Amino acid sequence: MANQSNFFFDFPTLPKELIRAFKKSTDAAYKTFSREYGDYIETFFNPLLKFLVFWEKLLVATPWLVIIGVVCVFAYYGTRSYKIVIGIIISFFFVGYMGMWEDMMESMGFIIVATIMAIAIGIPTGVWMSKSNRAQAVITPILDFMQTLPPFVYLIPVVMLLGIGKIPGLISVIVYAIPPMIRLTNLGIREVDREILEAADSFGATPWQKLTQVQFPLALPTIFAGVNQTIMMALAMVIIASMIGVKGLGQEVLRAITNQYFTLGMLNGLAIVILAIVFDRISQAYGKRIQKHRSGDAI
Amino acid sequence: MSSDNKIEIRKLYKIFGPNPLPLIDKVNNGMSKDQLLEEHKHVLGLSDIHLDIPNQSLQVIMGLSGSGKSTLIRHINRLIEPTSGEMMVDGQDVLTLSQNDLLDFRKNKTAMVFQKFALLPHKTVLQNVSFGLFIKKFDPLEAEKQSMHWIDRVGLLGFEHRYPQQLSGGMQQRVGLARALANDPDILLMDEAFSALDPLIRKDMQDILLELQSELKKTVVFITHDLDEALKLGDNIAILKDGSMDQEGDAVNILLSPKTEYVRKFVEDVNRSRVLKAKNIMQNSSEISKDLMNGQSMKVKGDDVIEKFIDRVVVDKPTLVEVLGEDGSAIGYLSAERLSEILRK
């Protein structure tokens, strides 16, 4: 009887020793792998590191007035709204006045690089997915996995492989932020009106001409929604990535958590919100501008 | 093969489904579209289509929705692969072309106009019209020049920098027509091109097409579900039903001697006096009695439709109507009896 109740109340498990052995051997294998190839992989990512450092240095070294000016020009060109430009000036001044300028610039550089990389990898992947149902069948579950696996979990292998620093941080941010880019590129291209594609076919367009002249331009609004989401996700992840050595606003938030500095946390949190709103408004505005042909008004 | 035919369609079959080839025999042995769907889960698109389209003629393919007419026109430029058959264009079987040759064929021989226009919404009118030339890698300046010519011809000068969304339906289809013509194709494929337009605009577009055709002499394949449109435009009309050809012939042939019940129903409500021309129904002198020949006669042109002279016949009550050819000499006659026989029903 005792045996039976055990069966019903305790989930049948592998013997503890076996589980331990499994974990140990997997970890050991991975450690050997990273010891063996870690250096190569680091060398492989070296150009990326240089690119990242270039952006961070550029943003930190550029006089703050110039940065605000450039952001305002971008914002105005995208939105044509003075309200948003003035809002940006006020909030950037607030961040700088509170002594968070340099941190914000580091985070901004990080997000810019992560977004550029996510676009550079995500768009071709999305295009490939849209062209091949098999690719879609394989990639979709991978994206689901990437989006639902807690970020803390995949920080572990990245850190084991590359240690603590900018590159592992950047990689984990890209992994976290890239799914919407891929998904929405795929969706945008698949959504293109079949009759318009047929028209392109009827004129003898090659697959490349169809992609560049018809599918991609018509998918752009959806792709831009993907860019926007990718930026937002990169912003969220850049905070978590501070746990593995990414500098910037996230590091201050981490310090505030460990030391229970409420105000410090709040201020840096606000700076992140400001950064998010600025990126969001500007990228959305550009997304809308490329849809100008959809309006019925004269242009 | 006769050199007068631009397009010759032979034994063309299209059955939609995963494994259509073995089903052709069943269709040949009389299996109906419904049976095929029920028993084999395949959809019969086209069944044993034969059609000759003479060079420079306007061929109308008519049928209700589901009759396979849009499927048929897509076989001409092979947007749809047939299950079996031949599609000869200028003596070359389109269905045997390699992928590259097919692209060249589409670039140079055919151009298509679509029911829902299928314009590129992110390109301006000018860019849309020059799309085919862009695909052919034409010199951009030359492409613009040619495109502007066609934009002018369809009456859209001044709108070349607008986007399609900013134009009305009729104007959008003019862009579609200009886009097809700018490519200078031998064959113009028009898939229910005017069906989405309201009646007045549709009539305008029909007139534009006829005017352009009288000058350009393309081979036009025109799909429609509207018999009046078919009779107005077509040199020849082919009527499709459930994927098979019911009847093929010119307007007079279809109107006066419908072969099947289906065609008869179709033509029942047509206003014959608006479609039939004097020369279509005239008799020769041997069919006319001497008395009538010597009586009071009235002269009409051979190209006049009945509607154009019937009022004069009613008022003047001539004993005989004399039909004149283009040079002004009599080419035939119409007795009052003949006229009333044609117009009865």
Image (cartoon, rainbow, N blue to C red):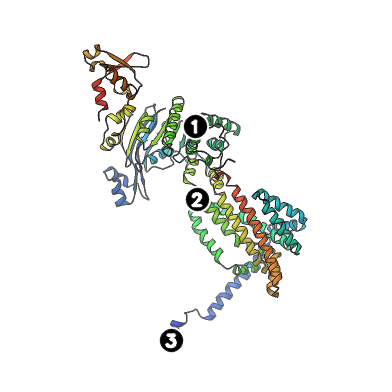
Disc assigned to residue A191: 2
Determine the chain carrying the residue at label 1.
Answer: B
Q: Which residue is mark 3?
A: A3
**Dots 3, 1 in contact, CB < 8 A:** no
Residue for point 49% across, 43% down: A196
Q: Nearer the viewer, residue B337 or A208?
A: B337
Q: Chain of mark 3?
A: A
Disc 2, SS: loop
Q: Residues within 10 Å of mark 2 (few under 14, many from 20)?
A: some
Same-chain status of marks 3 and 1: no
Percent across and percent down for residue A159 are 65, 68
Q: Residue B288, image x and y in percent?
A: 23, 16
Q: Does residue A42 sit above or below A297 in this rendering?
A: below
Provide the residue designation for mark 1: B181
Q: Earlier in the sequence, mark 3 or mark 2?
A: 3
Q: To which quarter of the image does residue A293 belong?
A: top right
Q: Amino acid at mark 2?
A: Glu
> Disc 1 on helix, strand or loop?
helix
Q: CA distance from mark 3 to mark 2?
A: 58 Å
Q: CA distance from mark 2 to mark 1?
A: 29 Å
Closer to the camera in the image, B157 or B12: B157
Query: Residue B147 appears at what percent x and percent y?
Result: 55, 32
Residue A139's label in the rendered image is none
* Visible residue check, residue A268: yes
Disc 1 marks which amino acid?
Leu
Mark 3 vs mark 1, CA separation in Å: 85 Å
Q: Amino acid at mark 3?
A: Asn
